[in-house]
Amino acid sequence: MSVALVDYGAGNLTSVRKALAAVGAEVYTPAGPADLTRARGVIVPGVGHFGSTRTLDQAWRHAILERLDHNRPLLGICVGLQWLFAGSAEAPDVPGFGVCQGLCGRLPDIEPATGARQKVPHVGWNTLALPRWSRLFAGIADGSHVYFTHSYAAPLARGTVATSTYGIEFTAAVEEGLVSGVQFHPEKSGQVGLQVLRNWLTEVT
């Protein structure tokens, strides 16, 4: 199974590549959009600022859509998940992929329930709430811990299949047909993260 790990200058590619190798995936980094034609699945990783997704221009979008049209799944990780939405307040002039409705917003500096200050970015382990079944979380228990590092988060949406809470409840994972994404880092989330990657790979045939 040949999985394209897209390098647009914002991804932790080494760790993601190692995690994918650990679950049996064959991974390559496409030199450009035209190099996606042999991909049986596409991963858009990312850390840092949403503005870095500007590099995912129309040529990349067209190539990714072409893969989806050929029933090849897409997975976004961290900023890659946020890119699946319409956009982000972090870079208002940069459009997202728009598969999911809504805009990503900054996590609050004040915990609404208590009024206490909280550190942003949200860095570390947090629990997942799994409101309904999804293929991404098959065999994974509600309340499992995964590793986050982010200042902005996606809103709850139609395709939300996992949530977490840091001041506010936000989308921790989304699934819309062959398009899915996780806000946490599966490559840093131990056996739970590896199982998420295994589950996604079941769509890469």
Image (spheres, rainbow, N blue to C red):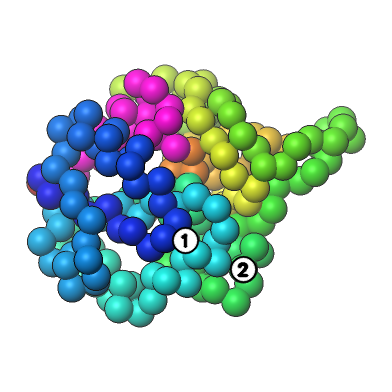
- Residue 175 place in picture, x, y as percent: 38, 48
User: The N terminus appears in which quarter of the rendering?
Assistant: top left
- Residue drawn 66% across the image and 56% down it: 105
User: Visible in this render: residue 72?
Assistant: yes
- Residue 77 place in picture, x, y as percent: 41, 47
The residue wearing badge 1 is 83
Q: Is residue 86 left or right of residue 99?
A: right
Magenta segment boundaries in residue numbering: 185-203
Q: Answer with mark 2 or mark 1, whichever residue precedes in sequence.
A: 1
- Residue drawn 18% across the image and 46% down it: 27
Q: Quadrant of residue 103?
A: bottom right
Secondary-structure class at tag 1: helix
Seen in the picture, residue 20 relative to 155 is either above or below; the reply is: above
Q: Is residue 51 left or right of residue 106?
A: left
- Residue drawn 22% across the image and 66% down it: 31
Residue 136: give its label. Answer: none
Residue 91: give its label. Answer: 2
- Residue 173 place in picture, x, y as percent: 46, 42
**Label 2: few (<14), some (14–19) or many (≥20) C-alpha neighbours in 10 Å:** some
The amino acid type of the residue labelled 1 equals: Trp
Q: Is residue 178 left or right of residue 147?
A: left
Furthest-right residue in view? 115
* Label 2 with label 1: CB-CB less than 8 Å: no
**Which sits in the foreground, 184 or 85?**
184
- Residue 201 place in picture, x, y as percent: 21, 40
Q: Is residue 108 left or right of residue 170?
A: right
- Residue drawn 43% across the image and 27% down it: 189
Judged by depth in the image, the label closer to the viewer, 2 or 1, is 2
The amino acid type of the residue labelled 2 equals: Ala
